[in-house]
Amino acid sequence: MQRIFRKIGYCPTIKTNVSLPIIYVENSPFGKVVYEKGTSDCPYIATGFECSIKCPIHESAEDIIENP
């Protein structure tokens, strides 16, 4: 199962704050609900542009979310 969580942060490529949807994938061992960070859905890249940096918003998002 997947869930989308949003992370707000500054994008140096487009020089503005962005609400970035990040897909988290469920990995629930032993009945504990845990989501691990997956990919992000960058609105800049979605418009057809390329980005040459690692996304600082995605990088700063939590790697694991427990019991959301």
Image (spheres, rainbow, N blue to C red):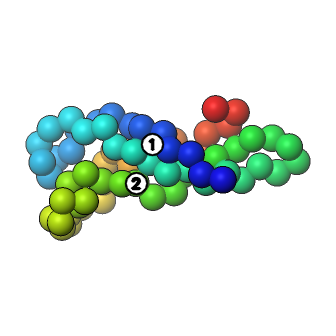
Kind of element beneath mark 1: loop
Neighbourhood count class around disc 2 (C-alpha, 10 Å): few under 14, some 14–19, many 20 upward: some
Q: Image height check: is 7 above or below 48?
A: above
Q: CA distance from mark 2 to mark 1?
A: 10 Å
Residue in view at x 21 percent, y 35 percent = 17
Residue mark closest to the camera, 2 vs 1: 2
Residue 67 x/y as whole percent: 70, 33
In the image, 35 versus 61, the foreground residue is 35
Residue tagged 1: 61
Kind of element beneath mark 2: strand
Check whether the beta carbons of the residues at disc 2 and disc 1 lie within 8 A of each other.
yes
In the image, 6 versus 59, the foreground residue is 6
Residue in view at x 49 percent, y 51 percent = 23
Q: Identify which amino acid the numbered label 2 is placed on.
A: Ser
**Whether residue 36 is visible:** no
Looking at the image, residue 14 sits to the left or right of residue 4; the answer is left
Q: Identify which amino acid the numbered label 1 is placed on.
A: Ala
Neighbourhood count class around disc 1 (C-alpha, 10 Å): few under 14, some 14–19, many 20 upward: some
Residue tagged 2: 40
Q: Quadrant of the C terminus?
A: top right
Residue in view at x 44 percent, y 48 percent = 22
Q: Image height check: is 28 above or below 54?
A: above
Looking at the image, residue 23 sits to the left or right of residue 46; the answer is right
